[in-house]
Image (cartoon, rainbow, N blue to C red):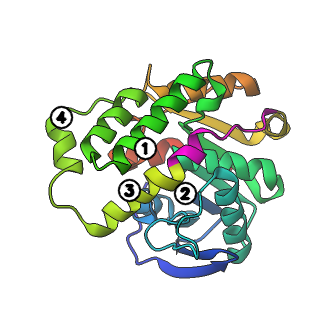
Amino acid sequence: MTSVSSQPIVRTLRVPDGRLHYELRGQGPLVVLVGSPMTADAFAPLADLLAGSRTVLTTDPRGINRSPLDDPDQESTPPLRAGDLSRLIADVDAGPAAVFGSSGGACTVLALAQAHPEQVSAVIAHEPPLNELLDDRDELHRATEEMIEIYLGGDVLGAWRKFMATSGLMMPDAMLEDVFGGDRDPRQVADERWWFEHELRGTTRWKPGVEALRAVKDRIVVGIGDASPGQLCDRTSRTLAGALGIEPTIFPGGHTGFAEDPAAFAGRLHGLLP
């Protein structure tokens, strides 16, 4: 698969409560790549690889980076972000779209499939953090509230340690301090704070409508990284797949496999697109 490195077309869409930054690459059937809180930049290498045969849309989710909200204290939830995706697909006027979402973005694309099934030709939900589906949901919700409190109290590294431990992700203290400590880009810090304060809770407490998703399960793929066994999002993804009566699909890499090795990830993803 050849990477297309031409500059994307950059657009802004006004929505009722803010503005959405989005980018378009390539030509062909529409593919949407979304994260939460990951921005369009995080998906650029993967988008370039798919743009040889697809029109690829990437976006900054509401409240993050170049997608400001009129009310910066508004909460972000999968249904609200799904409404944004619906408007973006309509604005591009190239649907129905194959939509790929990773992490919180996986919750977004599932919410889109529930609310607007006519706009999706395929839904690939990679490791959605659907804590509400698990038997230990109450314990997980308490842990989420604790990490939010720790972060807003000023202990950034402590909050990320709690997040990593709860998620089952491995990051040595030295790496944690390198990534989240010291002098950091102010925009990155602002987005991080907004995610802890206004997005993390609404995403992990969202419960998908399993019956509505079963009605379109022939279009749904639940993805799990081959390096994710035993992690929280491995558990949530397998629980969702079981509830839908489908087998999970294994992708290369871990929770952020799309960024770790975009070429390997693109090869797997391309084979799942209609």
Q: Mark 2 points at which residue?
A: 33
Residue count near mark 2 (Cα–Cα under 10 Å), binned few <14, some 14–19, many ≥20: many
Q: What stretch is highlighted in magenta?
A: 200-210
N-term mark: 3 or 1 = 1
Please tell me which residue is depicted at 75% across the width and 61% down the height of the picture.
96
Q: Are marks 2 and 1 in contact (CB under 8 Å)?
A: no
Please tell me whether residue 208 belongs to the stretch shown in magenta: yes
Quarter placement of the N terminus: bottom left
Residue 170 shown left or right of residue 28 in the figure: left
Percent position (x, y) of residue 118?
Answer: 83, 57
Label 4 SS? helix
Please tell me which residue is depicted at 52% across the width and 23% down the height of the picture.
139
Residue count near mark 1 (Cα–Cα under 10 Å), binned few <14, some 14–19, many ≥20: many
Which amino acid type corresponds to the residue marked 1 in the rendered image?
A: Ile
Q: Which mark is residue 148?
A: 1
Percent position (x, y) of residue 255?
Answer: 42, 37
Please tell me whether residue 154 belongs to the stretch shown in magenta: no
Q: Can residue 239 be seen in this view?
A: yes
Q: Name the residue under label 4.
A: 173
Q: Do the residues labelled 3 and 2 touch (CB within 8 Å)?
A: no
Please tell me which residue is depicted at 70% across the width and 68% down the height of the picture.
89
Q: Do the residues labelled 2 and 4 touch (CB within 8 Å)?
A: no
Which amino acid type corresponds to the residue marked 3 in the rendered image?
A: Glu
Which amino acid type corresponds to the residue marked 2 in the rendered image?
A: Leu
Residue count near mark 3 (Cα–Cα under 10 Å), binned few <14, some 14–19, many ≥20: some
Please tell me which residue is depicted at 78% across the width and 59% down the height of the picture.
119
